[in-house]
Each structure stands twice: as C-alpha cells, then as structure tokens.
C-alpha cells in the first residue's frame, strides 16, 4: 500500500516543481510571429549550371508567421521511376510545417502534403512523412535571400515575389 502512495506523491511533487519553474511551459495558444524579413513568397528561378546537371530541383517557399509551405519542382534527365509519377522527368512535391531561425541557421520541419495543403497518402508517388532540413541563410538584399541546405552543396537563390505580414492565428 505504501508504494502506490509514494509514486503518487513523487508524481505530484514533479508536477508542482515543473509548474513553478520557467523551464516547463505549455504550448502557446497562438501562432508565433516568425522572422519578419522572410514573410512572403520566395521563388527560385534557376540552379547554377542546371543544363549540366542530370537532375535538379527548383523551390518556391511561402512564409506566414512561423509556418512555411514549399513546393519542390524536380527536373530529371534520368529515368528514375514509373512514368505515372515522374511525368516525363518532371514532378512537384509539397511540404508544410513550421520553422525557427537561430543566428544564421533556419530549421524547417514539416510533413509532405498535396498542393491543397492536405496530408499526402504515404502509398503515393515519391516522398511522404516528415521533411526536415536546416539552411544557412544569407540575406543578400531585402528581396534576395540565399538558402544553403546542409544536406546539399547546391544553393537555393530566391527572389521575393510577394511580401506579406504576419497575423498570428489561434492554434
């Protein structure tokens, strides 16, 4: 009889201690504002030496508050799968999620989805599930930003297509 009481007392003590400390906190009820310079739609028009590459991807990124949506259009000269998926060597994948920036590093984490933001069926073409990437950010001007992925040597040079401002929404 004493052991269950001891476990209950210990759990109550941990909970009380957590609530009194600032390290423990509940998730926010509202979206956070994100980075003001990123708010808007960013487009990559080309890749360095793309004519010499067997395959490459072009990125369109949208940032709204702390959320992002990216479409990744891949162009490939190699036959890497069923034509119903690759559509003659071109296909687009979509990701939505949240991001945070620390110093010059942008961390994005989300899920692959369909073009309408609905979640992607894992049995479909290409990637599904979690998408996670870190980019070193180089802000060239107010309307030019370079994203350098840690998983690739090919920089993503983007230009601002449309600026927007963050209006946080309830979660």
Image: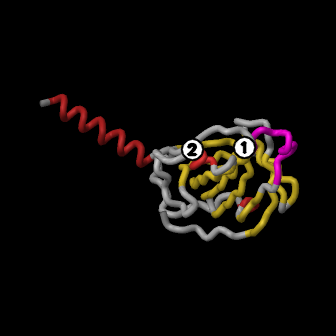
Question: Magenta segment, which residues?
Answer: 46-56
The x and y percentages for residue 68 are: 63, 57
The x and y percentages for residue 145 are: 81, 54
Q: Is residue 169 visible?
A: yes
- Please report contact status of discs 1 and 2: CB closer than 8 Å, yes or no: no
Q: Can residue 101 be seen in this view?
A: no
Please tell me which residue is depicted at 68% across the width and 42% down the height of the picture.
134
The x and y percentages for residue 35 are: 70, 58
The magenta stretch spans residue 53:
yes
Does residue 163 appear left or right of residue 133 in this picture? right
Please tell me which residue is depicted at 58% across the width and 67% down the height of the picture.
168
Q: Earlier in the sequence, mark 1 or mark 2?
A: 1
Please tell me which residue is depicted at 52% across the width and 45% down the height of the picture.
128
Q: Considering only vertical position in the picture, is 98 above or below 132?
A: below
Which of 28 and 84 lies nearest the eye of the viewer? Answer: 84
- What residue does disc 2 label? 126
- What residue does disc 1 label? 76
């Amino acid at each position: 009889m004493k052991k269950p009481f001891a476990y209950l007392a210990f759990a109550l003590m941990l909970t009380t201690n957590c609530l009194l400390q600032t390290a423990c906190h509940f998730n926010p009820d509202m979206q956070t504002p994100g980075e003001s310079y990123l708010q808007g739609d960013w487009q990559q028009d080309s890749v360095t030496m793309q004519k010499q590459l067997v395959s490459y991807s072009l990125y369109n990124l949208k940032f709204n508050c702390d959320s992002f949506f990216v479409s990744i259009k891949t162009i490939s000269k190699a036959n890497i799968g069923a034509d119903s998926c690759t559509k003659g060597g071109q296909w687009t994948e979509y990701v939505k999620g949240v991001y945070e920036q620390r110093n010059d590093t942008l961390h994005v984490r989300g899920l692959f989805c369909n073009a309408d933001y609905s979640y992607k069926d894992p049995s479909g073409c290409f990637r599904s599930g979690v998408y996670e990437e870190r980019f070193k950010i180089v802000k060239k001007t107010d309307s030019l930003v370079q994203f350098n992925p840690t998983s690739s040597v090919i920089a993503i040079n983007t230009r601002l297509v449309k600026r927007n401002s963050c209006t946080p929404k309830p979660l």
